[in-house]
Amino acid sequence: MICCKKTPLRITHKLFTVPGLILCLLLTIHSKSQAQKAAVPVSMYEQASEVSGKIIQYGQDISAINDFYWPYVLDPNNEEQFKDQVLSSPEQRKRLIEVNNDYLKQLAQVDFDAMSVYGKVDYILLKKKINLALIDLHKEEDQYNSIKQYMPFANDIYLLEAQRRRGVTMDGQTVAAKLNDILKELKIDTASFNKVPSLDMPLARKAREAVIGLKSRLKNFYDFYNNYDPQFTWWVPAPYKILDSTLTLYSKQIIKKGKLHTTQKPDSSGIKGVPIGREALISQMDAEMIPYTPEELIKLANKEFAWCNKEMLKASNEMGYGNDWKKALEKVKNSYVPAGQQPATIVQLSNDALDFIKARDLITIPPLAEETWGMIMMTPQRQLVNPFFTGGREISVSYPTGSMEEGDKLMSMRGNNPYFSRGTVQHELLPGHNLQYFINSRYKSYRQDFATPFAGEGWAVYWELLLYDQGFAKTPEQRIGMLFWRMHRCARIIFSLNYHLGNWTPQQCIDFLVDSVGHERANAIGEVRRSFKGDYSPLYQVAYLTGALQLMSLKHELVDGGKMTYKQFHDAVVKEGLIPVELVRATLEGTPLNKDYSTNWKFYDFNK
């Protein structure tokens, strides 16, 4: 609304007409609506945006489709029924593709330019998620089309399950005959499959997944009618049990035919993986909004690693070991606390970090978050793959148990000494993963499905870098402890990308961690096994330092540039959720965005 100098009101006869009054009234209403629109407080966008409702609806619609088509399974412990998230049926996959395409059409109708930056960011996130979902669905469809020849009986089971979903009355004798027909077909397929020399391992895994899904769907059908329909209960149990056990045997036979076709060079590590290659790496980096090539990220990591080496030598010299930093590292490793005392050490280290952060007013730490973080001890089985702490709602403490071999006990204690842990406790707790969990469940929780490790792990490592720069490591031993982890983050980029480019074997990755970073060998083996066994994205290990450097660059622009205080910056970043850092930057800086926005932020200065 434009403010004018007050003057005496004079009403002329010409203006004082019905059309004139209507015009004045409309102008007044329009002015008020524009003022109200402009007056929307920024705090409103801490919880929502113009697109948040559509994001929630999309998530619920996808869940509705999956919940309808996934089979129920019975928990034998409490007899509660829950959904078994098995491989999508063809009908389920078709509906998911249709729903995703429908939402793309809805987004095309949105007035993008009229929205706030928060709405624009949510629009970009939702569109990106839908497009990636469609890519995955079509890939799954192609894989299913490649394996359905081994399961010609599948449609009969899908049809039985479809009738169950609407409680169709079944004739028990007819069902028993149908199950016997399926069993005959399955036996023929089993004999035919025996002649198949081998199957590409990803397809073999997908085929096994499909058969296990069919087994679950058949059980869902059976449990619905058995004992509730007398005729069904008379005829069906015997053929069902034979068919169920035969499906189990067939799924095992399929996976035995799987052959891992990999470009991985043979080595002695015993770790098997599949390097995905340069093209796939670039595609995944684009999806994560990282506008660099794998070679550029390796160059970045080597540059950061060289800086760490210089700092490590300084600390080693201060400790009296000259340039033999590995001897200094040995002293640090041998500072471990006795078994049973690690939990108390963690509490003390957490308190040290929080005192340091609060004294510098770096971020808001909600009292309830500080009160309610939890702690559990990591099982020996998990420590084989995860030799260090993990965090989130609670910190999972990696330290030896009585059942471990003597050598493994010592390596676990040395690898989790107090100086090493000084950098990782706050990474897992406050202000790292635990604060993310606390804040992200209270602000923009609808963004949880957009989470990326470049923001999740990047934020936690960012605090390692920032606290080091702020002087949190006061002694050379403390600096070595924090530098060890910084070198580890660099090494993750170097060995992960070199492996997936086909340059290194798993054994070379292990040796690199031992020789260049100073890892205990058992811990290095666990780290490499976790990286390549298939549960993690090929870029997951790359995300730690890369995401942290993105946040350091953004901090340089906004905090070092005098536009925000540390506290304002950190409070704002964490409330945006675990979305790509480039979009956090767009939110805080007002970067121009468009409907088809693609990654372009070159956050790293190679010339420094």
Image (tube, grey):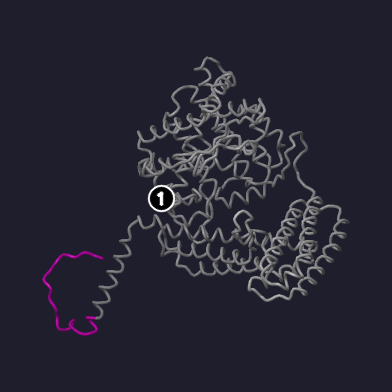
Q: Quadrant of residue 296?
A: top right
- Residue drawn at x 56%, y 43% is 543
Front-lying residue, 397 or 601: 397
Tell me residue 115's x, y (percent). Answer: 41, 63
Tell me residue 365's x, y (percent). Answer: 38, 41
- Residue drawn at x 55%, y 50% is 289
Tell me residue 440's x, y (percent). Answer: 45, 50
Tell me residue 402's x, y (percent). Answer: 62, 29
Q: Quadrant of residue 493?
A: top right
Q: Is residue 529 left or right of residue 416?
A: right
SS assignment at label 1? helix
Q: Residues within 10 Å of mark 1 (few under 14, many from 20)?
A: some
Give the main secondary structure, helix, strand or loop, of the magenta stretch. Answer: loop
Q: Which residue is disc 1 drawn over?
A: 588
Q: Which residues are magenta?
A: 1-21
Front-lying residue, 584 or 414: 414
* Amino acid carrying mark 1 in the image: Leu
Q: Is residue 3 left or right of residue 183?
A: left
Residue 171 in the image: above or below residue 538 = below
Q: Is residue 113 magenta?
A: no
Q: Is residue 369 left or right of residue 159?
A: left
Residue 453 in the image: above or below residue 524 = below
- Residue drawn at x 81%, y 53% is 253
